[in-house]
Image (cartoon, rainbow, N blue to C red):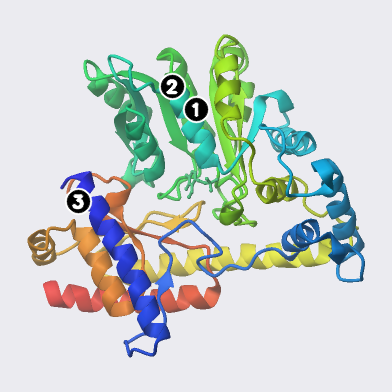
Amino acid sequence: MSSHVRTNHLAALMERAACIKEMLQQGVKKPYKDVIDVSWGDPHRAGMKPLTFVRQVLAACLYPQLLDGDNFPVDVKRRAQKLLRWCDGGSVGSYTNAAGIPEIVESVAEFISQRDGVPADPENIWIQPGSQTSLGSILTLLVSSEASPKRGVLVPVPGHSTTSLSVTALGGALVPYFLDEEHGWELRADELRRALASARGACRPVALYVINPGNPTGHIQSRKSMEEVIRFVAENKLFLLADEVYQGSVYDSNSEFVSYKKVLHELGPPLAHTLELASFHSASKGFLGECGLRGGYVELLNMDPDIMPYVQQLFNLVTCTPVTGQIALELMAKPPQPGDPSYPLYKQETEHMKCTLLDNVKRVQQVLKRLPAVSCQPVQGGAFAFPRLHLPLKAIHKAKEAGMQPDMFYRARLLEEAGVFVSPGCEYGQKEGTYHIRFCIMTTADTMEELLRRLSAFHLQFMKDFS
Ligand SMILES: Cc1ncc(COP(=O)(O)O)c(C=O)c1O
């Protein structure tokens, strides 16, 4: 099925979900009272609450009159006053440097240095309106539509579809490498070699894109796997694009997030001083979940000095990142500390979120394990569960008759019959003959229970109808 037809189905289902929501609001009777929308990696859309500290500082920055009374704790006021001093004219309504407010870029550099134990140079960091914008900018550099042969980017399958769309929109070629579902969606070096060989004659591969922790897979790469990736990238003179936006979301006690920058540093020279790396992070994910504020950054390492002027030019195309997004990044980089008046509430809210997410992951695994014809690899991190559906032939035929991918068909019925809105695996790429759905696990415990209840009941009925 062409990607065009698939995109039409996706758009039609988004419209249908909006239409059902509207009908429910108008009192139309359905077997459910609301639509649970877990189709995006958007924690607030899925029901998570914003952090009080973040919203108080933002509120005070946007409306400084709030600083006059006793509305907020003193550390909130001090932080807002400091942020306003960094803004030209003392207002978040002013333009900022294209790379971001210099003091916030410094905070991001400190955050990276503390995370990795490796110094970060603010000169190598650019704040952008979300990490997706930074990814797009770097891809623009790497993939020129006029290049012949076409420039190729190795992308994971399944993987974040927006990046793949950017590559093709820029005139580049996708070189898919498959993640190993049977081994928890591991990234295997032999598969990278196969993918690279398959591109020979079709395009000139210039970059490898990795997502760690994975979207949609929930896999967290081991250090060994990351070292293999780095060596592969170096041997083949590629550029490494490390999408690390889910670094704050780790659920498996045996896994840890380690940045590509840290692993590269620890491999030492010559690799540490030569491998070109762009690492992306964002205020959209993790505890903040502030997707709509649009604050992300990229850190570049070992860039060819001849290329840097072009990088500057490209980043300067974005006049500046929304100041509220930059503030969100500052607060992610420098949250309240023990002893600060806001710390107890911040701690309570983040601990509650952590416990909720751990419980959600546990419940998802428990419930899916009990469902027939469903298997799900461990959700070690990230924002999603990505179960595989072993659909009956009758359902597959029915889907084909309707001109849909089988998992799109399943998803459409799940929406109509149970009011649960998930994404189909075909949106992210999957091995031929396998079908998946993806749903966001960053939601409240009550919503997760209701989602699992509806999904289970729907699935059992679906299997009965099509067996
Ligand atoms: C893997 C991955 N990278 C990047 C992004 C984009 O994030 P941002 O909001 O920072 O643009 C997303 C969003 O869902 C994502 O899943």
Residue type, label 3:
Val
Helix, strand or loop for disc 2 = helix
- In screen coordinates, is 417 left or right of 49? left
Q: Which residue is mark 3?
A: 5
**Disc 3 and disc 2: Cα gap in Å?**
29 Å
Using the rendered view, name the quadrant where residue 34 is placed. bottom left
**Disc 1 and disc 2: Cα gap in Å?**
6 Å
- In screen coordinates, is 36 left or right of 197? right
Crowdedness of circle 2 by 10 Å Cα count: few (<14), some, many (20+)? many
**Disc 1 and disc 3: Cα gap in Å?**
29 Å
Q: Is residue 457 visible?
A: no
Residue type, label 1:
Ile
Near-viewer residue (196 or 295): 295
Using the rendered view, name the quadrant where residue 366 is placed. bottom left
Give the numbered dot on residue 138.
Answer: 1
Where's residue 70, x and y in %? 91, 71
Mark 3 in CB contact with mark 2 (< 8 angstroms): no
Mark 1 in CB contact with mark 2 (< 8 angstroms): yes
Helix, strand or loop for disc 1 = helix
Q: Residue 303, relative to residue 14: is it above or below?
A: above
Where's residue 269, x and y in %? 61, 12
Give the numbered dot on residue 142.
Answer: 2
Quarter of the image where the C terminus is located = bottom left
Using the rendered view, name the quadrant where residue 394 is placed. bottom left
